[in-house]
Image (spheres, helix red, strand yellow):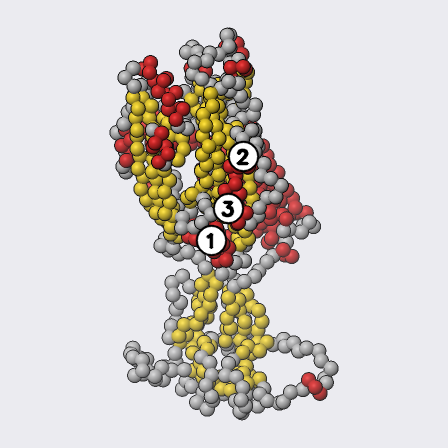
Amino acid sequence: MSSIVFYVIPALLGRAYDLKNDSVGADLFRVEVTQNAKIIEKYMTTSEYKVVSELSEATDFLDVSGKLSLKLKTGNTNLEGAGNYLKETKSFRNKVDLLVKVHYETIIKTLPAEIKPISNWQDSVKDTGMTHYVRSILYGGDLIASVRFTTKKDEDKEVIKATVAGELNSDSGSFGGGLKGGLEKVREKIGDTASMDINYYATVPLGKEIPRTLDGLVQLVQEFPEQTKAVNDGYGVPLSMEVFSLEALDKNIKTYYQTLALQDQMLILDEQLSDIQNSKQRLADWLQTMPPNLPKEQNDMIGEFATKLDSIDRVFSEVIANLNLSAEAEGDQFKPAFAAYMGDREEAIPNMYVKDLSRLKKEVLDGTPSLEGDFGGSHYTHWGSDACPSQTVLVFGGVMSTTDRDSIGSSQYTCMPNDKQYPEGNNNSDDEIGDYPQVQQVAFVSRKKNGEQKRKAIKCSSCRVPGKSTTTMLVAKTECPSGWVKQYQGTLISTDIQQVRGQLVCLDTSKPFEDISEDTESLTVVTEVSPKCGSYPCSGGVSASTALPCVVCSITKKTSSISDFLTIHRSHTKSRYRLIEASSESNDFLNVDGKLALKAKSGWSGNLQGLGKYLKHLINRQKTIELLCTVYHETVAETFPTYTPQKNEWKSKRPEQVGTHYIRSIIYGGQLVISYKMTVKKEEDIEEMKAAVDGALAKEGCLDAHVAGKV
């Protein structure tokens, strides 16, 4: 049984390899034999891109997942290119990356099938844990380019991602110079809502000057094969290895298999590790914005949380360094990490420590008045009161004013503050102006029959509704629409019959009025407004003498309906192949876990259609080499924005009614699975066929006309 793994220093052809711990052992073949290895020329380049906003999307695109991904995250292994990118990218908070992956293959060095290992080679691997040996090594170069968009606001992240995918016509595909125009449009559209920078991670030197522009990125992608050829006599560097089980050399050695039974625990381990590392990164980012002289109580709270994260991270690192995925491995090896993560809690929730950090921030800010920030929101004037409702913030209180009725001035009303401020002048005659128009109070006189006809002053206040809110006045309404908050209810007023036109405003008549002490003859007078029946239908006791009601309402931004999902157009096709020698390889290639594969083979296929039918089909692999191909086309993805609120009712349901997960997004499109089987008549001919296939095709790659010709 063979496996394709990333190259590990100091691996050489014919050298023993431990698939459990990704370590290299002794030479099993004579060095002079391995130096005359068979060379298969490849010289092929693939360049792809993908828009990613989550770490899992990046690891999938870079083909770095499972055990290797965990070891990279904890620093337990090194991998140039993709590995360096993943080490630097701990969190995608406020970030969207356009990842470009350039893969250039030059040659494969492989051991000829007829060579034999050294005598007594078994002594070299005895008690060492070695499971495989290196049969072939692929040379070339890998380049990972990251065009990163960092948003200023959390809620802009999904918009930026949709903008990038929209301008490139898909969120993934082949990378070429034609995409530069789309990226330039993205930069124009995002404006100052996000910054853009370009970084590179490569397995070969990129020269003295690293390009930081879109033109430079396109040029580097085009020239990367030539830069790779400048290394190691034109071959580039080792990229990956094909390792064969030691059973191929000695039938008495038991083949090492990596079990899929621990896959669920691996996923949980990965999720919890991401939560811890994400929390550490967010904490570090937050602390950069905090003053160094925090009160001792707040400093202790932050220090205790940081120490806790570091302690959990160390336990995870130790567990991952000693991961054993052999068929005999036990699930108990994960317990120390899971126990450290849970602490004294009985139940884990997604992103548990990120949520803890949010609570910590609130406690620190609430406990440190000098750090409290209160910005943004919508403003309105509360006519009839110099105070604001409890859920709003009072900016200032005052009295309703406008220019006097006898002079040419404004028809608008303003709330003149009680605590007025005037610039300090020199009382210079040059600063003097004419004595009109002048601002003075507005007087209210009620037209109601039982109302006091005396002119009254109108108090007012400037109120702010915090958050991402909007505020409006509704006429002929006494209640706000569903989801809106009533700030106050009142009566519609405007200037009386003796005045020029004025504004329509909503006056809160539930509050007491005060008499106006000054001369009222020149004051602008306002009174109730009634409907003109005939122009509008009047019924139910409403007449031309009915005062029109009004209400002031506000709403804070939130998603209140499940129809508020984002639709992202993808229009992406991916076609790939892999040479299959074992069923586990086909499951891995098709992204099918062990549980689903077992269900399919037992007769259940759910709604998998073509994929399910393939999984139910059994192949005699003793005499068959399979070329498995997939064509995968995506059209659109529907997904919830990150700020979508939950419905509280689900928490009251029984666990069996709720289940274990919820659906965050759905991808639409189609998938085609092609199984091309090459079967020999005699089992002894299988090795000859394998050699022929190995000489013509790489283990896996893009499915195109060139591959079809080789087949």
Q: Is residue 330 left or right of residue 228?
A: left
Q: Residue tagged by mark 3?
A: 218
Q: Secondary structure at mark 2?
A: helix
Q: Residue tagged by mark 2?
A: 228
Name the foreground residue: 313 vs 53: 53
Q: Residue 684, position in %: x, y?
A: 33, 14
Name the foreground residue: 577 vs 110: 110
Q: Residue drawn at (42%, 30%), measured in percent from left and top?
A: 263
Give, as a three-letter code, the residue at label 3.
Val
Q: Residue 70, position in %: x, y?
A: 51, 32
Q: Residue drawn at (38%, 65%), measured in percent from left and top?
A: 481
Q: Secondary structure at mark 1?
A: helix
Split into 4 quadrants, where in the image is the N terminus? top left
Give, as a three-letter code, the residue at label 2.
Thr
Q: Residue 705, position in %: x, y?
A: 35, 36
Q: Residues within 10 Å of mark 3 (few under 14, many from 20)?
A: some
Classify residue 446 by image quadrant: bottom left
Q: Residues within 10 Å of mark 2 (few under 14, many from 20)?
A: many
Q: Residues within 10 Å of mark 1 (few under 14, many from 20)?
A: few
Of pointers 2 and 1, the one earlier in the residue sequence = 1
Asked if labels 1 and 2 touch by Cβ distance under 8 angstroms, the answer is: no
Q: Which of label 2 and label 1 is nearer to you? A: 2
Residue that sits furthest to the top in the current view = 120
Q: Residue tagged by mark 1?
A: 181
Q: Secondary structure at mark 3?
A: helix
Classify residue 282 by image quadrant: top right
Q: Residue drawn at (40%, 33%), measured in percent from left and top?
A: 701
Of pointers 3 and 1, the one earlier in the residue sequence = 1
Q: How much space separates mark 2 and mark 3, taking CA atoms?
A: 16 Å
